[in-house]
Amino acid sequence: MSATGDGEGATGEFVQSLARGLEVIRTFDAEHPALTLSEVARRADLTRAAARRFLQTLETLGYVRADGRVFSLTPRVLELGFSYLSALSLPALAQPHLEHLSREVGESVSAAVLDGAEIVYVARVPTRRIMSVGITIGTRFPAYATSMGRVLLAAIPAERAREVVAASHPERLTPRTRTEVDAIVAELDTVRTQGWALVDGELEEGLRSLAAPLHDRSGAVVAAVNISASARGDADAWRDACLPALRAAAAEIDADIRLV
């Protein structure tokens, strides 16, 4: 399939026509709010015939308007990013609840989202440095070895979760890290059932964390929140002491998300 074609041209599960349609949308920007057919074809590296078909399709769907020979995007394209933009408000919504939870339990509290096989921190209230690596907004860790990662992996279809874990090629980060895919997937089944995850010394020795999911209006899991602390005393006793407060904070954040 030529790069200038508009057929499906799939390689594996890559759909060429979808990629080209998105490229047509991206040809419009602040410096080029209105373009002719020839300009769209040139900027998207398409033939004029292919560019015309994509523009006509986008016009029919309401994402593009035509004014004579000139095309421009309509406000409807904002729908394409609405879910993502809504998710961007999550840190602001969660932060006051995280601060309250941190004061209540006296430990560091964070929120993260899943990005492929990793978690990405989007909000955090630290009380002390508990890891050898500093954690800031944007910090990434392998999902398979973290409490928030396991909560988030447990929320996606089981077969997809297995694929993600296997593709992570789990490494032994500490002597306690689970690296067998079957063992991690079995733990995800448990997390899925109980609604929370406890990880004790698997990401870093001496670090313990407890996580719960956050949900959007539809009930889908969109993020996770956790309490992390130095591993002191019995893990089950620590979990029992922290879990009610964690769940209450998650429920409060969920309620705020539903208002957005």
Image: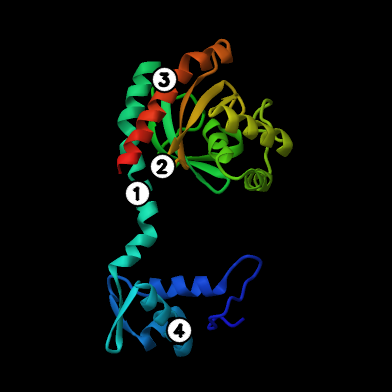
N-terminal of the pair, mark 2 or mark 3, is 2
Q: Which mark is residue 245?
A: 3
Q: Secondary structure at mark 4?
A: helix
Residue 36 sits above or below residue 215 on the image: below
Q: CA distance from mark 2 to mark 3?
A: 20 Å
Location of residue 126 in the rendering, given as x and y in whole percent from the top left corner:
39, 26
For label 1, the residue is 86
Of the residues shown, which amino acid type is indicated by label 1? Ser
Q: Which mark is residue 53?
A: 4
Name the residue rendered at 34%, 19% in the picture: 103
Location of residue 73 in the rendering, given as x and y in whole percent from the top left corner:
31, 73
Q: Quadrant of the C terminus?
A: top left
Locate residue 56 relative to residue 163 in the image: left or right: left
Callout in the foreground (2, 1): 2
- Viewer-closest of 134 and 84: 84
* Residues packed near mark 4 inside 10 Å, few (<14), some (14 to 19) or many (20 plus): few
Location of residue 244 in the rendering, given as x and y in whole percent from the top left corner:
45, 19
Q: CA distance from mark 4 to mark 1?
A: 32 Å
Task: Check if mark 4's residue and mark 2's residue have beta carbons within 8 Å.
Answer: no
Q: Secondary structure at mark 3?
A: helix
Q: Quadrant of the N terminus?
A: bottom right
N-terminal of the pair, mark 1 or mark 3, is 1
Name the residue rendered at 33%, 62% in the picture: 78
N-terminal of the pair, mark 2 or mark 1, is 1
Of the residues shown, which amino acid type is indicated by label 2? Asp
Of the residues shown, which amino acid type is indicated by label 3? Ala
Q: Secondary structure at mark 2?
A: loop
Locate residue 66 relative to residue 175 in the image: left or right: left
- Viewer-closest of 258 and 83: 258
Q: Secondary structure at mark 1?
A: helix
